Amino acid sequence: MILSEGLLQLWQSTGIYNMIEKVDPTITSSFGQFLHQYGHPIMLVICLFLLWLGIKKQFEPLLLVPIAFGGLLSNIPVAGIAEPTGFLGIIYEAGIHKGLFPLIIFMGVGAMTDFGPLIANPKTSLLGGAAQFGIFGALLLALCCFGFTLPQSGAIGIIGGADGPTSIYVTTKLAPELLGAIAVAAYSYMALVPVIQPPIMKLCTTKKEREIQMEQLRPVTKREKIVFPLVVLGLCIILLPDACPLVGALTFGNLCKECGVVDRLSDTMQNALINIVTIFLGLSVGSKLSAEQFLTVQTLFILILGVLAFSFATAAGVLMARLMNVWEIMMAKIQNREPKLINPLIGSAGVSAVPMAARVSNKVGLEYNNQNYLLMHAMGPNVSGVIGSAVAAGVLLALCH
């Protein structure tokens, strides 16, 4: 008798026994009941698919592999790895819920980023600014069409910046109850930049525009690179203090890189520190891929709005580049000179996915002109997008908090 009870208890503690949830009488819809019962197997399949994308297709593997594996761990029945007292729950609470990881990531991004292309061609900052349209467009959609509150809509809209750390930081301040879905959406769409952006870029441009070759950028002095982060931080202090935590972390990392006297600190931020935090951040974001938190109607709405925000941001950057070309042609005619046109493909790099969005611009440009190397030109709007998303985050915190 004791042996049989022990065997029964052992069987009831296995993952196979607990993989399928019991029927919940409070759930009335058959579809909701299906998701409740079979949520763990569904999420395990989704996480394996994300792993396949990261490993086989190499869609931003540094992000997607930890996120997907964290999702696998969080959907193991009984183990409680994603619970507040579990391994991933502790990391999540300390690093994401408190907002620490995003700021450390921004320091690393600043230390790895060269603002030279933006300094050499400042007008490309307009492309990074235009791409923030996706954030506010998605905010209005979420508020007016999907029934979210203003703080929730602001947190959802920030997905359009394609900046995972910023999305996490803003959401912890405005709508912490949506943090899991928004973090997963932001990092998933960042990883899918090479899939989402090219069709939009081609739809918004003509073949002739995609073949435009741009002039080589001017050299940027070391003094300019040192002064630039200080100027950016100074403007942020004066105009938008709410954005200072993100902008301050970014500019500190960049100043350490450019000043040349703290190479050890810069090297640590670029390599060891950001790699360690990326591991923990990816796993803890994946912990929010548990079935009960992810398989909801609200999460579906967030995923829809996220991809719309990202698409709007991409299209806005490209269309702004076309508008700038119209203005340049008009001014060139007035001044009787040759116009210096921008290849509109670099406008898509106005989102904050550095340097992935710039690489996508360069790849699409080479498809239409094998001499059309747009990478450095695209880095201008790309790094401008990083600053722009941080500024947009400050605006949202000021408006919605």
Image (spheres, rainbow, N blue to C red):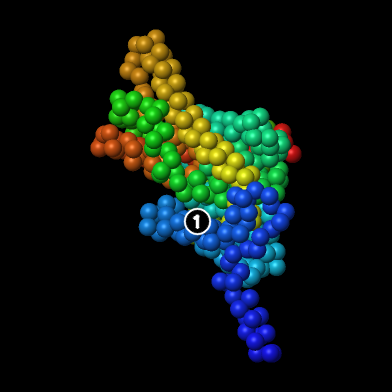
Where's residue 146, x and y in %?
64, 35
Where's residue 334, x and y in %?
39, 9
Q: Residue at the location (40% across, 44% down)?
A: 194
In the image: residue 152, left or right of residue 306: right
Q: Label 1, on which residue?
A: 46
| Residue furthest top in the image | 334
* 291 in relation to 345, above or below: below
The reply to whether residue 29 is in sight is yes
Query: Could you say which is closer to the camera, residue 65 or residue 303?
Result: 303
Query: What is the quadrant of residue 212 in the picture?
Result: top left
Where's residue 339, x and y in %?
35, 19
Indicate the secondary structure of the residue bearing disc 1: helix
| Residue furthest left in the image | 370
Query: What is the quadrant of residue 214 in the picture?
Result: top left
Query: What is the quadrant of residue 78 in the picture?
Result: bottom right
The reply to whether residue 259 is in sight is no
In the image: residue 326, left or right of residue 43: left
Quadrant including the C terminus: top right
Q: Amino acid at mark 1?
A: Ile
Where's residue 52, x and y in %?
42, 58
Q: Residue at the location (65% across, 63% down)?
A: 22
Query: Could you say which is closer to the camera, residue 368 or residue 153?
Result: 153
